[in-house]
């Protein structure tokens, strides 16, 4: 594998064989799905009365339900098959199935057989059910941990750009005089191109070639869900992903009729709004790699959920006043009062959806057992499908009882807030990481150097100077791995810090003369953490600096590496002295104003052999890093 984790990882991945053919294959598959789905949904919404006497709302939600039903019924079997099969071969077989389905769809579109097209959605769903576990288990087999966000962001961006283009193409083609014939040709051509791209995907060995397939989909479905539940963080992340698809399915399925019945727009307006929504998700996904600092940053998940709720509520409030009883074209719609507000809400719902979904997918891949990842993804797909079916059922029931589509959007926005609060209460790590992310992206501007010196796996002791009460939060926000901090127990117990400290599994410590038992417990916990492969950070000064200069290091670090010899990495935080969170004696208001968006330097040195560690040499290395930061600022 080539060099990993550099800032240009996204463009570099797009020219490498380990990623590009796979990316093209999944892109074309998503594109074809959405040409078909959007063409069919618009056909139902605007021409359905020519082919069926059933209400268009019912046909639209029935179509959505049939497409996702296979995810619920077949995902367990699909996960086993993908875990057992070499993945490039599995993808080629799946693309051959797509060609067959699209040939049938081409005939059905040409013949105007609406019910056959709706039935074919079930087969499309079955094909997508097989491809999902292959796609998301392929990524971590070819990408390093520090490339997961970049890879997932590209895949999510590509998927939603494909949805965008497919939505546009499907909508434009089906509105043409010869639309059904044009859609038929496009579906078959793209399916063949997707198969051709799959031929170049590199071989990806099966993690479980001897796996025995359990063909009982009910017992295997239960086993998959039980397996996911064994890892609490993965299970709750899967629930978060599933909830996103509940929201996404609601918006995507209801937007055509919302446009027609609430906004008074025609097919052009539908295509524009669906395009902007999917473009927003793609943009948000791509921005994740930049906002996360190329690590799995789950702090973006609460940020995404906040945006989904706020702009979902505003979409309900932003209904334009209709001046005409006729359906409006794009130009006329844009001239309507309130139309721009609707457009902004739709785009921002998409962007915040991207912030929400990409870190959750990367977290599932990172924290799942590689040998069972396809089955974890399959279990994820089962729950996704269950929530999407629930979306269709709730939509049918509420709309059938007289609730408007705008009111339905309000209901799901409020439900999103309730679900978010529930998940973040169960896993405070999400909320803690959000607070850290806000701190280092709004209050401070952190310049980071040498982060590649911290290993992606295995134990290490990090040593840093201690300048402010938020040192641990800044360090945690910069480093790709979870860090366990050794903290002075009085700081650990401060009201505003205790929540973050406990969530991050910090280790409280006291001096020997204050509480010897607590001190010994802390050393035992550090020893246990290192033996489990964790990264532990200590502040050897023992307390915050009172005058901006580094205090003399204490000997605790020597005792730690004597008990558990692991690499020791020196670090320096520079620029925090004088901020509101330091012990600077200056006027607090001035320190707050002066600290906003101030630049912080965070420097990391190369690892040292534990056999060579002394308190004096560590202090010299930390001091040298701080001196170098001062020189770069001209001090």
Image (cartoon, grey):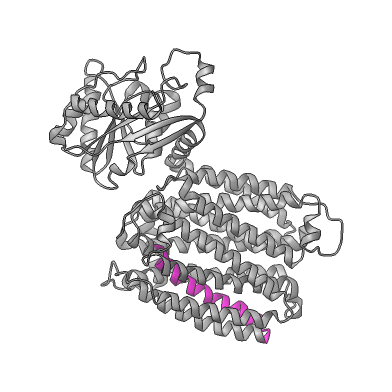
Q: Is residue 396 above or below residue 525?
A: below
Q: Which x, y percent locates residue 233? A: 39, 48
Q: Is residue 173 visible?
A: yes
Q: Is residue 195 above or below residue 155?
A: below
Magenta stretch bounds? 111-136
Q: Residue at x 26, y 16 (%)?
A: 514
Q: Residue at x 21, y 20 (%)?
A: 516
In the image, 167 versus 432, the foreground residue is: 167
Write down the quadrant of residue 89 in the picture.
bottom left
Q: Residue at x 57, y 75 (%)?
A: 121
- Residue 450 falls within the magenta-colored stretch: no
- Quarter of the image for the N terminus: give it: bottom left
- Residue 135 falls within the magenta-colored stretch: yes
Q: Which x, y percent locates residue 148? A: 39, 54
Q: Residue furthest front?
A: 634
Horizontal arrangement in the rendering, residue 530 relative to residue 250 (left or right): left
Q: Is residue 215 visible?
A: no
Write down the quadrant of residue 185 in the picture.
bottom right
Q: Which x, y percent locates residue 246? A: 56, 58
Instruction: Look at the magenta stretch and give its main secondary structure.
Output: helix
Q: Is residue 346 above or below residue 622?
A: below
Horizontal arrangement in the rendering, residue 30 relative to residue 550 (left or right): right
Q: Is residue 459 above or below residue 392?
A: above
Q: Which x, y percent locates residue 572? A: 32, 30
- Quarter of the image for the C terminus: give it: top left
Q: Residue at x 32, y 26 (%)?
A: 627
């Amino acid at each position: 594998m080539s060099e990993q984790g550099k800032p240009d990882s996204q463009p570099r991945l797009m020219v490498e064989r380990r990623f590009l053919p796979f990316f093209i294959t999944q892109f074309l598959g998503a594109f074809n799905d959405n040409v078909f789905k959007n063409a069919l949904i618009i056909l139902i919404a605007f021409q359905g009365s020519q082919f069926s006497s059933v209400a268009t709302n019912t046909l639209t939600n029935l179509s959505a339900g049939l497409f996702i039903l296979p995810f619920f019924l077949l995902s367990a079997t699909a996960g086993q098959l993908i875990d057992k099969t070499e993945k490039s071969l599995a993808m080629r077989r799946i693309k051959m199935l797509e060609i067959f389905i699209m040939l049938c769809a081409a005939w059905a579109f040409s013949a105007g057989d609406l019910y056959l097209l709706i039935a074919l959605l079930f087969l499309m769903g079955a094909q997508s059910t097989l491809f999902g576990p292959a796609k998301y288990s392929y990524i971590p087999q070819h990408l390093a941990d520090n490339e997961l966000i970049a890879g997932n962001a590209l895949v999510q961006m590509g998927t939603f750009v494909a949805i965008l283009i497919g939505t546009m193409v499907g909508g434009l083609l089906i509105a043409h005089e010869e639309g059904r014939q044009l859609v038929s040709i496009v579906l078959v051509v793209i399916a063949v191109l997707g198969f051709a791209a799959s031929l170049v995907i590199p071989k990806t060995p099966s993690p479980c070639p001897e796996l025995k397939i359990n063909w009982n989909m009910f017992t295997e479905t239960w086993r998959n869900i039980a397996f996911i539940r064994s890892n609490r963080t993965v299970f709750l992340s899967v629930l978060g992903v599933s909830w996103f698809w509940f929201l996404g399915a609601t918006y995507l399925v209801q937007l055509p009729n919302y446009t027609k019945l609430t906004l008074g727009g025609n097919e052009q307006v539908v295509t524009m709004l669906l395009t902007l929504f999917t473009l927003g998700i793609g943009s948000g996904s791509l921005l994740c790699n930049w906002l996360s600092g190329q690590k799995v940053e789950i702090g973006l998940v609460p940020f995404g959920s906040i945006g989904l709720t706020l702009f979902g509520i505003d979409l309900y409030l932003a209904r334009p006043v209709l001046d005409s009883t006729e359906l409006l074209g794009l130009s006329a719609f844009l001239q309507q009062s309130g139309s721009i507000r609707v457009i902004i809400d739709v785009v921002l719902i998409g962007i915040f959806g991207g912030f929400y979904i990409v870190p959750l997918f990367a977290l599932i891949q990172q924290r799942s057992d590689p040998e069972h990842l396809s089955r974890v993804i399959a279990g994820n797909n089962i729950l996704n499908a269950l929530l999407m079916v629930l979306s269709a059922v709730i939509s049918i029931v509420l709309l059938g009882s007289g609730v408007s589509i705008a009111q339905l959007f309000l209901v799901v926005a409020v439900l999103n807030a309730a679900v978010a609060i529930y998940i973040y209460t169960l896993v405070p790590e999400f909320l803690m990481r959000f607070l850290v992310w806000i701190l280092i992206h709004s209050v401070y501007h952190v310049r980071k150097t040498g982060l590649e010196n911290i290993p992606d796996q295995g134990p290490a002791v990090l040593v840093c100077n201690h300048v402010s009460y938020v040192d641990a939060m800044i360090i945690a926000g910069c480093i790709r791995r979870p860090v366990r901090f050794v903290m002075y127990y009085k700081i650990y117990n401060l009201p505003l810090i205790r929540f973050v400290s406990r969530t991050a599994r910090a280790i409280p410590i006291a001096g020997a003369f204050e509480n010897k038992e607590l001190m010994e417990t802390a050393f035992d916990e550090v020893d246990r953490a290192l033996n489990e492969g964790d990264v532990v950070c200590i502040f050897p000064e023992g307390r915050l600096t009172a005058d901006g200069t580094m205090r003399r290091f204490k000997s605790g670090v020597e005792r730690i590496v004597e008990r558990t010899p692991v690499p020791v990495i020196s670090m320096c935080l520079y620029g925090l002295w004088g901020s509101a969170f330091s012990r600077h004696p200056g006027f607090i208001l001035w320190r707050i104003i002066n600290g906003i968006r101030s630049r912080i330097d965070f420097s990391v040195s190369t690892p040292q052999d534990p056999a060579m560690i002394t308190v004096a040499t560590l202090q010299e290395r930390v001091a040298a890093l701080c001196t170098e930061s001062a020189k770069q600022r001209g001090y």
